[in-house]
Amino acid sequence: SNMAAWVDGGWPLDGMISRANCSDGRLAVLVTTGALNPIHAGHLNAMTAAKATLEGMGIQVVAGYISPSHDAYVGPKCAAMGTTAFTARDRVEFVRQACEGSDWLHAGAWESSPQHRSWPDYPLVVKCLQDCIAAKLPPSRPIEVYYVCGLDHYEKCCLSRGLRNGAGVVVLPRDGKTASVPTTGSSGSSKARIIAVHPDLCSGALQQYSATKVREALREGNVDKVASYLPQQVDVGCVIDAYALLAGGAVEAPSSFVPAAAFGPGSGSRTASDTSDASDTGESMYYLSKEQISVIRSKGLALLEPYADSLPGWVPTRLVARALGYSTAAIEAAECRHGNNYAWCTEFENVHSTWTFAEPGFMVGNRRFNGSEQLYQLLKAGDLGSEGFEIHADLFASSAEMEVYARGRDLILRPDWEACKDTCMMFALRLKFESNYGLRKLLLSTYPRPLVSVKSDKYWGAGLNGTGLNRLGELLVELRTDLMAQGGGVGAPPLGGLPSRVGRAADGATDERPLDAPPLPPAEWDVPREVIYGKERNALMSGLRNTLKKPGSAKVGGGGTLTNPNLDPNSNPNSKPQPPNLNPKPKPERPSGRGQAGCIRASIRRGSIGSGSNR
């Protein structure tokens, strides 16, 4: 029965058409969207008040549609709020039940349909309804569509300018405050179809009821209070059963938990020939550290509560998704391509939102970077020590993850970015993992499982339909292999504490690396080996090449004259002559008179946020 509303593309139109054919004059249809998690009596009161307002103006309302939002919107929103998200199927069913006693209200199921890869926003929902109505009725019988929303949404989305698709807007009051309605449209040539509902028509419609109150009553187990909030036609038992399934009934047995120490093939050091996996549960697993206990309890993730006291450890990825209110479809799609036993955790990401993780940071010469994301985004401007790199280095190194992510999307990309971004990401990842023993141990414990980042990003992640490249996961697998080749098994001490390390020099030779040596730069960067291992290594790795050369000379490695005797091939017998730079790049002019902040602003291209290609 919960699929009864899935007709006519998600919009039940037969009743609306019948009433329109029997009516004269100006006709209208109402539509409202929202989480409806779950629907309550206030939603019906609001639609009734909007209908009364239009009909008081001589506009006959022939139908009204209540459209629950997509799971991709409701799930993350509820997870961020620490509350339970009913599934789209349940929310549509509750709306359908609520509308059963009405001759004009219907459940709109198009918006929440699983056919959408991402959630459709309200303008698209309104446009879809307009198109469906236009396809059913002749042009001689037009029906106006009005979007019904609250005052806060009206002001936040600047709907005083109207909707671009020509739909009208009916605004409900908030705390007795009525919307300010413009007298003309955005073009100034026609009267705007924006109508404010008088507070007297919706007394209690918005304040007395709320979905939050319904969920609180469900959590308290107060059936009478739940029933008082829901529309009379809604089956209270169905709502309670659906909530119990989400909040507690679907908890898997704690036997599915794998302690951190037991994860991976055996224990201690291992090599690529070790293929047995003592923790192979036959499903994909997600690592949760002890720090996630506070997240589980502050957000009320009931499905994960049985595991909280046993952390750190690995739990089924599907269980984590359900606890956060996500569909498991993306996980299943990723498993079809990468196998059903992949591993992942927030520690492997560069940016953290849902789960908490404090990036350990690392030193690049005498400059500290807060994390790998900061260095990766900065490398968009140029190689270590380049003009573009240095202009932004201090600002990017100290920025927070999300802040530097936004700054990176504003940068003017280096010409070779698409060709070298994987190399830059690997360089940042090496610094992150080789500088922290705990992270290395966690990464090594995942062998031989594939590593898959399930997110919408189709380059670094697997995408929501499993067709993404998953480059971040692939790079981490490559790094894991390299770390295992260095003898860094789970039972081994930190790499920096080994008696010595063997690394590959730029020319392929083998050299003993100092105990405090950072990861080697990519070979194609052609960084001189004497700089990597010599006492001036830190100066280069901090990007201070411009301090090691005379004004006007080429950069280190480019054949210029070096002022530091330790780097001058003529003064250092262990140095190697540097090849000439056959394709010197023109040095960008530094804006004058504005200091470092002015240089940063001058080199950042404004208005390009959201292009997506800069990642």
Image: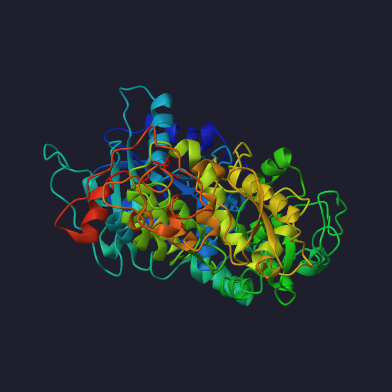
Residue 401 on image: x %, y %: 45, 61
- Is there any visible trace of residue 95 in the rendered image? no
Q: Nearer the viewer, residue 488 or 374?
A: 488
50 or 114, which lies in front? 114
Which picture quadrant has residue 301?
Answer: bottom right
Residue 418 sits above or below residue 492 on the image: above
Q: Is residue 524 left or right of residue 596?
A: right
In the image, what residue occupies the spot 62% across and 61% down?
Answer: 434
Residue 77: image x %, image y %?
Answer: 50, 59
Q: Position of residue 58 (x, y in %)?
A: 24, 43
Determine the residue positioned at 32% across, 22% down: 139
> Whole-percent x and y of residue 260?
76, 67
In the rendered structure, the answer to whether residue 193 lies left or right of residue 148 reads left
Image quarter in which the C terminus is found: top left
Which residue is at the front of the view, 30 or 313?
Answer: 313
Tally the numbered discs. Answer: 0
* Residue occupying image coordinates x 22% and y 43%: 193
Instruction: Say if 294 sits above or below 537 in the image.
Output: below
> In what quadrant of the picture does the N terminus appear?
top right
Residue 526 in sight from this viewpoint: yes
Give 392 or 513, whichever is nearer the viewer: 513
Drawn side of residue 380 relative to residue 530, left or right: left
Q: Is residue 83 above or below residue 128?
A: below
Task: Find residue 128 and report its image quarter.
Answer: top left
Colour setup of the view: rainbow
